Image (spheres, rainbow, N blue to C red):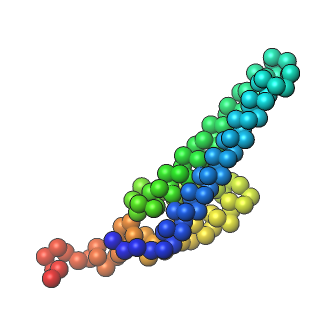
Amino acid sequence: METNPTVKTFAVIDLLLAGLSLLGLCALSAAWFYGLFLSGDPAQDKLIGSIGMFIYTLLVLSIFIVFLSAGMGLWKEKTWGYYLHIAAAVLAAFSLIGIVYTVFALIFAFRPEFKAVFFGSPAEKGQSPTSQA
């Protein structure tokens, strides 16, 4: 297997984005705690706010899991990491800043030298096991 520094770079970026998502989860938890126990709002407002926070927390948690898995998979040079990296790049496109990441992540992910880390180079696929010396 070849090693490509770009793969490790995107692994680190994916892990950093997972860390940002984790910070977002911490902020959501703090806001949820405040809303439930410290805000003094009526019970109905707390219920509606909790439902909204729960849905938003599930969304951010799923983004965290995808980015963390993609980063770990790229770092270990696993094929599933490659596919999760593409999925994470598409998810990032839904944020304003993430559009820039998405463009570069997809451009590099579809380059032959990037894909060769996970699938082997096209020259290796054409060789049969008996023709190798």
**Image quarter (top left, top right, bottom left or bottom right) of the N terminus:** bottom left
For this view, does 133 lie left or right of residue 32?
A: left
When asked about the image quadrant of residue 55, the answer is top right
Query: What residue do we see at 67% from left, 31% from top?
Result: 54
Residue 46 visible in image: yes
Seen in the picture, residue 61 relative to 53 is either above or below; the reply is below
Task: Give the camera-side residue of 131 and 38.
Answer: 38
Q: Where is residue 92 in the image (x, y as percent from the top left)?
A: 64, 56
Query: What residue do we see at 62% from left, 63% from top?
Result: 102
**Image quarter (top left, top right, bottom left or bottom right) of the C terminus:** bottom left
Query: What residue do we see at 73% from left, 35% from top?
Result: 30
Q: Where is residue 115 in the image (x, y as percent from the top left)?
A: 43, 70
* Extreme residue toward the bottom, this view: 133
For this view, does 2 lie left or right of residue 105?
A: left
Q: Position of residue 127 (x, y in %)?
A: 23, 77
Task: Give the camera-side residue of 72 and 95.
Answer: 72
